[in-house]
Amino acid sequence: MSEHPTRSRSYSTPSILDLVLTRDKNIMEQLTTEAPLGRSDHSIITVKLYCDKEITTSTVTKYFVLQKGLYQNVTRNQQY
């Protein structure tokens, strides 16, 4: 949860209105608040999360089978 006000207007008391909901509070590494965008009265909240997930990659090679092309349909539909 943010410890700094995330919403304020010039005529009211700043308040903490925004929450970050998670099942595990240990995945939050860092929470920061930044200036609002434009005329908004809500601060920007940036959350850095720690996600321990193994990522596997594979290489996929795509190629065209030129012998299966319907070339007669291509030339029939061309306009010169």
Image (cartoon, rainbow, N blue to C red):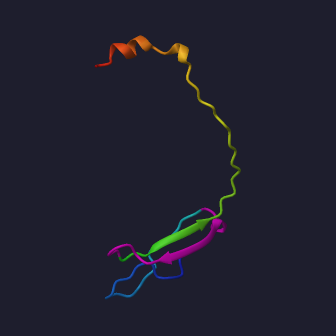
Closer to the camera in the image, 58 or 9: 58
Q: Is residue 31 visible?
A: yes
Instruction: Say if 54 sits above or below 13 in the image.
Output: above
The image position of residue 62, as x and y in percent, is 59, 29
Q: Most extreme residue toward the top, as rendered? A: 72
What residue appears at the point 59 percent right and 67 percent down from the top-left corner?
48
The image position of residue 39, as x and y in percent, is 32, 75
Q: Which residues are magenta?
A: 23-40
Residue 31 lies within the magenta run: yes
Closer to the camera in the image, 51 or 26: 51
Q: Most extreme residue toward the left, as rendered? A: 80
State how many labels appear: 0
Instruction: Say if 9 sits above or below 55 in the image.
Output: below
* In this rendering, position of residue 6 left or right of residue 77: right
Q: Quadrant of residue 77?
A: top left
Q: Is residue 1 visible?
A: no
Instruction: Say if 12 sits above or below 74 in the image.
Output: below
What residue appears at the point 44 percent right and 14 percent down from the top-left corner?
71
What residue appears at the point 60 percent right and 72 percent down from the top-left corner?
30
Q: Quadrant of residue 72?
A: top left
* In this rendering, position of residue 4 left or right of residue 58: left
The image position of residue 22, as x and y in percent, is 58, 63
Instruction: Say if 67 sits above or below 64 in the image.
Output: above
Residue 26 lies within the magenta run: yes
What quarter of the picture does the N terminus occupy? Answer: bottom right
Closer to the camera in the image, 40 or 64: 64
What residue appears at the point 39 percent right and 17 percent down from the top-left corner?
74
* In this rendering, position of residue 9 left or right of residue 3: left
Q: Quadrant of residue 31?
A: bottom right
What quarter of the picture does the C terminus occupy? Answer: top left
